[in-house]
Image (spheres, coloured by chain):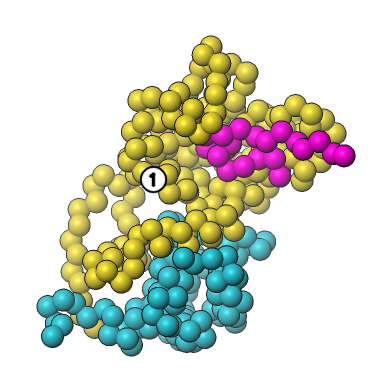
Chain colours: A cyan, B yellow
Amino acid sequence: MTDRAVIDQVDAALVGSAKLPRDNGVLVFEEPWQGRALGMGVVAMERFGITREEFRDALIVAIASHPEEADETVATAYYAAWLDALEATLSARALLISEEGAT
Amino acid sequence: MDEHDHDHGAEHHPIPPSASELRARALEALLIDKGLVTADAIDAVVEMYEHDVGPQNGAKVVARAWTDLAYKERLLADGTSAIAELGFGGMEGTMVVVENTPTVHNMIVCTLCSCYPWPVLGMPPTWYKSAAYRSRAVAEPRSVLAEFNVELDPSVEIRVWDSSAEARYLVLPQRPSGTEGMSEEQLAALVPRDAMIGTGKAREPERLP
């Protein structure tokens, strides 16, 4: 089970452009899927041996390749990039191959 | 990468989900289908973050209303503007603040999906989204409240407010006794999330030694 310390470690590892969006120190979630995305990421890092640094680097790449669009808020753009990073790190472990493609 | 071409109808949802929301849902469904993660494991993490986001913004609104009568009047008349006065915006729809009194107890629910006042309360608790809460809050609010350890005198009227894309509700709980002379900051610490959903009450202050 994930505990509080893991949450703090993830928080500490996400630096630079990968920093979790906050307002006055309070995490910003605008819609529930953003929380689910964050939760999935943390669980995936725990389960699949994705180091926090590897995830952070993938996130920084994703953020850089998708600059925030005019009609997007910071949290929306951030968590869209978060999904990119999650898919990239999971794909690197061949965890997203569909059943039909599996041998 | 393989492309998933989901074509879900979402007519029940008042606002169409964004592309990112659909992606997040599809990814979660895939990971669960493959047995790689469980929804419970994700819930547990989300709940931890939910405490981090916390309902601090809502608690500040409540504390201000308890200490500033003119603010309270503005808050009850126009929730969106009064909440924006404290710097909290980004609300979808109109914010309506409903006041608990000795004779009326308010609670909020979203019977259709999980509309919730995010900017003031943070992440919704898992139970708020459960089918059981969504249906029972309307059908048998008094029993639901009892399960949350909220015992009300039978003479107290319970009003259940159904959130939607157009209107989000926030409950203004009753100020506990013994809090005279407390600062706004101290008062805000007495306001748990559930008090603002109406499934709880503000805490009594602890006696100082």
Given the image, what chain letter belongs to the residue carrying mark 1?
Answer: B
Residue at image coords 71%, 44%: B189
Instruction: Tell me if residue B89 comes above or below residue B26 in the rendering.
Output: above
Q: If the image is split into quadrants, where does the C terminus of chain A sit? A: bottom left
Instruction: Tell me if residue A4 comes above or below residue A12 in the rendering.
Output: above
Is residue B105 magenta-colored?
Answer: no
In this orientation, does residue B123 appear? Answer: yes
In this image, B31 relative to B55: left or right?
Answer: left
Q: Depth check: give the residue in front, B27 or B95.
A: B27
Secondary structure predominantly adopted by residues drawn in magenta: loop
Instruction: Tell me if residue B182 comes above or below residue B42 in the rendering.
Output: above
Residue A48, how many percent across, how many down?
38, 80
In this image, A6 relative to A32: left or right?
Answer: right
What span is in magenta?
B188-209
Q: Quadrant of residue B102?
A: top right
Is residue B199 magenta-colored?
Answer: yes
Query: For the residue labelled by badge 1, is the local secondary structure a helix, a strand or a loop?
Result: helix
Q: Depth check: give the residue in front, B70 or A22.
A: A22
Residue farthest top in this picture? B155
Q: Depth check: give the residue in front, B94 or A44.
A: A44
Residue B176, how many percent across, how many down?
71, 29
Residue at image coords 56%, 16%: B153
Could you tell me how many numbered marks the image carries? 1
Residue at image coords 23%, 47%: B11
Residue B157, how many percent across, how many down?
51, 17
- Which residue is labeled 1 in the image? B129
Residue at image coords 71%, 43%: B188
